[in-house]
Amino acid sequence: MTAPCADKEPMLHALLDGELDAANAAALEAHLAACPACARRLDTLEALHGRLAALPPARAPQALKGRIEAMIGAEAARAASPRPRPARPAPWAGWLAAGAMTAVAASLAVTPLATGPSLPRQLAEAHVRSLQADHLVDIPTSDRHVVRPWFNGKIGFDPPPAPDLAAQGFPLVGGRLDYAEGRPIAALVYRRRQHVINLFVLPAEGGLRLPRLGPAGGPGPGGFSMLHWTGKGLDYWAVSDAEPGELKGFRSAFEKAEG
Amino acid sequence: MTVRTLPFLPPFAWGVFASQGGLFGKAAATPRRRAGEGSAAVVRQAAEPSGPPQSPADIERFRRLLLPFQDDAYGFALHLCRDPSAAEDLTQEAYLKAFRGFSGYRGGEPKAWLLAIVRSAFLDWARGRKAWAGLVDPHAEAEAAEQAPAQDPSVEELMVLQAGVGELRQAIAALPEPFRQTLVLRELQEMNYRQIAEITGAPIGTVMSRLARARGLLIAALRPAPGATA
């Protein structure tokens, strides 16, 4: 058996990939008719091509798709209301720009104009997404020893404790990676009877400039109850459609369990 | 055999192809490059002077053009880093970069644009892990070039046809870079030569020689081990 012609090898690939121009393709076809070794080589390459094409393609995990969706939602809200505005060249241009901004804001009907969407609003939206997108948790477990390490290396800060508070009426459902303020954040998911409580956890440095809600929690954006507190270098935001009073009970149970 | 038409050619790719006289004939003469060269610059050009989509319609366009390729982006990332959890991070990072640089997208095949960003995210990740040195074996291209030429072609075709899915996957994962990404882009992502050149920042001639060697290595890997009876 003679070996295929080494100088024809690259052409065989180009022919297989449909990348050969007509003149070269015709010349190569003529060679193949006369050279069984090259013809066999092309058969082998075609066989490989066919086997590779038949490999089952990779599928992005559903949780990843959910995170990408969450990220786009959060980024889109930021993009729709940029923070710094360039100086305006003339008064009328300012009015035009303001008009355009109002139009954009009106069509979105989402955020106040002056700044990007506030963190409470981002978290309220994340809460809604978590309920809608069939993506409440990435890691469904009530085992605190599983949830906390799961966040390691995913959020860029030390993961929060994730105590199971079932005894206090707040069973731990699991953990989820979410997205706010342009960064991944941790979301611990608890239940209070039929209500879901998302406990969003961020590093505390962003906490001071944020609007605070009353100590008993209050209605946040979208009509959800929201409660914010800080502890051990972390910012906690509990968001739920449960009553604000429930969140207060949740916080004290959480802090007690944390020790 | 017809020549595939290539309508897709974003502006930042012109530099890559302007130097190419044609699709063929430069494979042997192309200077060797490291895998990391070129494409980072491509992505930077594409993404840096630009910002996120500016209007709801633009955001909708982003979703429509790029969200269909989440599986492809993840699959490519997985082949690059060979770590499912890192592949998820890279995919998300790439979508973030793509979103924030979307106004720099100038039309053309969105999948190729996205995969170039995935690759760029991967290179950043690999550098951050100081795994860069292990990524590209400077001798790999030379060694691959010296690979023994095909043995009996009919035996080889049989081996290829009989290879199982696991065996094929393992053989792909064992390919050294830059051959692995070139093969994956062509055979699994169905990118054409120009798109691969654009994504990897290599001239088309280099893409062709890498692809030929990648396939040669893959076929060789599917051969029975020496001494084993076929």
Image (cartoon, coloured by chain):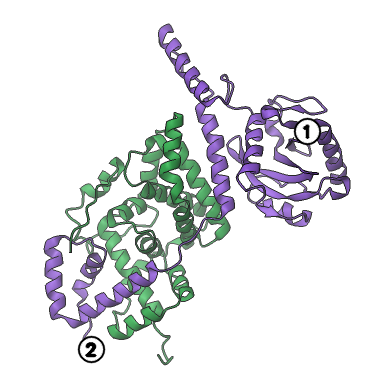
Q: Chain of mark 2?
A: A
Q: Is residue A248 left or right of residue A130?
A: right
- Give the number of the disc on residue B153: none
Q: Nearer the viewer, residue B28 or B103?
A: B103
Q: Mark 2, residues whose alpha carbon is within 10 Å: few (<14), some, or many (≥20)?
A: few
Question: Which residue occupies 84% across, 49% down?
Answer: A166
Q: Colour of chain A?
A: purple
Judged from the image, the secondary structure of the residue bearing numbered disc 2 is: loop
What residue lies at 50% left-to-right and 24% top-to-bottom?
A107
- Give left or right: position of A228 versus B39: right
Q: How many marks?
A: 2
Pick the residue in front: A227 or B150.
A227
- Quarter of the image with the C terminus of chain A is top right
Decide: few, some or many residues near mark 1? Use Cα within 10 Å; few <14, some 14-19, many ≥20: some
Question: B7 or A230: which is nearer to us?
Answer: B7
- Of all residues shown, which one is farthest toward the front? A194
Q: Quadrant of the N terminus of chain A?
A: bottom left
Where does label 2 land, which residue? A1
What's the chain of the residue with tag 1? A
What percent of the width, then of the height, locates residue B74?
49, 55
Query: Can you give x and y, in whole percent of width and height, for residue A137 in the image?
Result: 67, 50
Q: Colour of chain B?
A: green
Residue in the image at 74% along x and 38% along y: A234
Residue A69: percent from the left, percent from the top?
54, 43
Dot 1: what SS?
strand
Q: Is residue B142 visible?
A: no
- Would you place residue B82 above or below residue A235 in this image? below
What's the residue type where badge 1 is placed? Answer: Trp
Q: Which residue is mark 1?
A: A229
Q: Is residue B69 visible?
A: yes
